[in-house]
Image: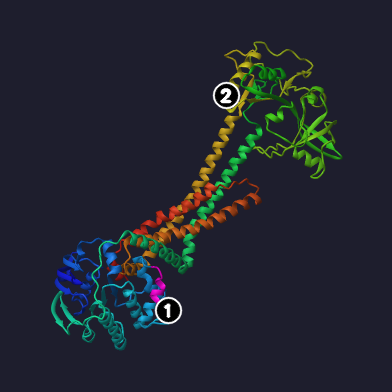
Amino acid sequence: MAYPAIEVRNLHKVYRLGEIEVQALRGVDLTVEQGEFVAIMGASGSGKSTLMNVLGCLDRPSDGSYRLEGVDITREDEAALAHIRSLRIGFVFQSFNLLPRTSATENVALPLFYAGRQRDGNDRARQALRAIGLAGREENNPSQLSGGQQQRVAIARALINDPAILLADEPTGNLDSRTATEIMTTLQALNREKGLTIVLVTHEPDMAAFADRVVTMRDGLVVSDQRNRPPAAPSLPITEPRPTAVATSVAHREVTVSLLTMALFVAGRAIARNKMRSALTILGIFIGVAALIVMVAVGQGANAAVAAQIEGLGSNLLIVLPGASTSSGVRAGHGSASTLTVSDADAIQREARAVANVSYLIRQLAQVQYAGNNWNTVIQGTTPSYLAIRNWPVVAGRSMNEDDEVNATRVCLIGQTVYQNLFGTHANPIGATILVKNVPMRVIGLLEPRGQTGFGQDQDDVVIIPFTTAERKVLGVAAPAQTEANLNSIYGEPPNPFGVPRKLTGYVNIIFVQARSPELVSTAESQITKILKARHRIMPDQLNDFDVRNISDITEAAQGSARILAILLAAVASISLLVGGIGIMNILLVSVTERTREIGIRMAIGARRIHVLLQFLVEAVLLSGIGGLAGIIAGVTLSEVISLAAGWPTLLSPAAILGGFAFSAAVGVFFGFYPARRAARLNPIEALRYE
């Protein structure tokens, strides 16, 4: 059974302007059979354009029934109406409604994207333009075409999807009489030759004469319905109506693919069209991503530097310092008195089960000389196990051994700073003899460079010699600079009327202890404290004359500070990204306002709300993505420049790079969603009327 192409019963349309109601349609009844050519005439305000918008599914009636090829349109949702506008209805507007700065071919091919028929779309569009008399004008923009040529492009666009019905709203209103006649002749030929159902709105009787029927409207009502001639038999058979309400899943997939392609193309064109505005929009994301990468690189570089310095102290390390001295009732800091001995270190090595290794040292500032060069540096007398505990390898020569310690051999290891000041940068120091406090010492090894500590102390400015050599031949014993604090004795200091410094043989300045594992550091600390308290005869209520320091606590504190610094730097950089996102939202809101009419055109030729939403989201993500990629390049480059120029440690983080790009895309989606949703919720007919 063949249904009428259009069947309208008791159709009403009411517009509300504040508290005023305007009845544009007051119960219109109209039937248009398939293959008919119907003209609707009437004065301005008669309701003919409103009826045309309802018939074209651009607007919804307030009341009444509208059936298109047997389907009740008033019950369909927006997606189904968009599908009908895409495949079953072609619309020709009085003002052409072509996309500016877009070629005739692209304008005609546009409905194919929303219909999922983009395959060979441009070829089909060119063929349609040639068929309507526009050969050679396919690549011209609307501004390069005359009014009649633009209307022909609009007709070709309306027919590109082979619709069953063509609606033409004042298609000759802006044309001269000759061009208007040509357009009407073209429409009449389409009706006669292809059986196309045409509904024409016009106020000119000579244009209405081309139609088979003329329907006259006044004040929202049909007042007459006259037939000029019986409908002509079409040269092609009229096909049965196709389903209009629901698209297949295959069509949905095709539409999605075509829309993504078109959205990328349109977004790229919009960005290129407004280069300066797009560049300023991208700038916020660019700065944010670049700042994020640089700040995270600096923060992680600082963290790595701290970790390297702590590693340089040694793994699982505990440091035992002597107690404090007292002078005139004033106590100095730890290490100002000599309370630790070699015997204490041996006892710790022997009795503490959680301890793997022990070393100790004495140190002084002294002058070193070689071949006319001299340098003031730190001289450390220590045991062979010191370098292993400190994780400090020798890069040239050899390290000290037990024979050097037992025999008090006059050999030494020098740091990089001492090497550069005594030998320069090219001489080989191994085997050379230097003077340390005027004592000749043979250089047997060059230490690996360590750099500065967190307090600015140069770790490479050192000469290391065997402990026995230092005590017996170079530095002497570790005599205290001040009177030792005897806090735990009830007796006073013994008399020393001549002020002769005491010889405290076997005393050391520092003891280094290495625990067997990180888990045993606390246990080792407790065992060391217990052993030294027993050896120094310290009662429970008395103060310790030593101090055990856990490097793990220092490590955790330093690493925690570095982590907090990195987080703070990343947070500051993230604020730039948020500011850039606000810029994207602002620009897209402006773009939606500027392109409101374009949105209406796209909806009129079949675009669904989700298509419009996706189009603006793609544009937002493209803006943020370009800014993100540019920011990554700038951030990586700037991190390297900072590291080379300023000498700051930087560590590029792949997670920060990928995270910065992902965050920029997320910013684009988040801040682009509101403008995109606002564009998608526009009413097609209101968008078309926007000026």
Range of magenta residues:
118-126
Amino acid type of the residue that numbered disc 1 sits on in the rendered structure: Asn
| Quadrant assignment for the C terminus | bottom left
Q: Is residue 139 above or below residue 670?
A: below
Residue of label 1: 140
Left or right? Give the position of 574 relative to 677: right
Between residue 119 and residue 583, name the one nearer to us: 119
The answer to whether residue 604 shows anywhere in this view is yes
The answer to whether residue 332 shows anywhere in this view is no
**Mark 1, secondary structure of its residue:** loop
Measure how far apart labels 2 and 1 are at the Cα level.
82 Å
> Residue 401 placed where, x, y %?
77, 27
> Residue 54 placed where, x, y %?
22, 69
Look at 24% across and 67% down and name the residue there. Answer: 59
Residue of label 2: 522
Q: Is residue 397 above or below residue 25?
A: above
Left or right? Give the position of 125 relative to 62: right
Would you say residue 603 sits in the magenta stretch? no
| Quadrant assignment for the N terminus | bottom left
Between residue 237 and residue 302, name the one nearer to us: 237
> Residue 449 placed where, x, y %?
71, 39
Q: Residue furthest bottom?
A: 178
Picture quadrant where residue 252 is located: bottom left
Q: Is residue 564 above or below residue 623?
A: above
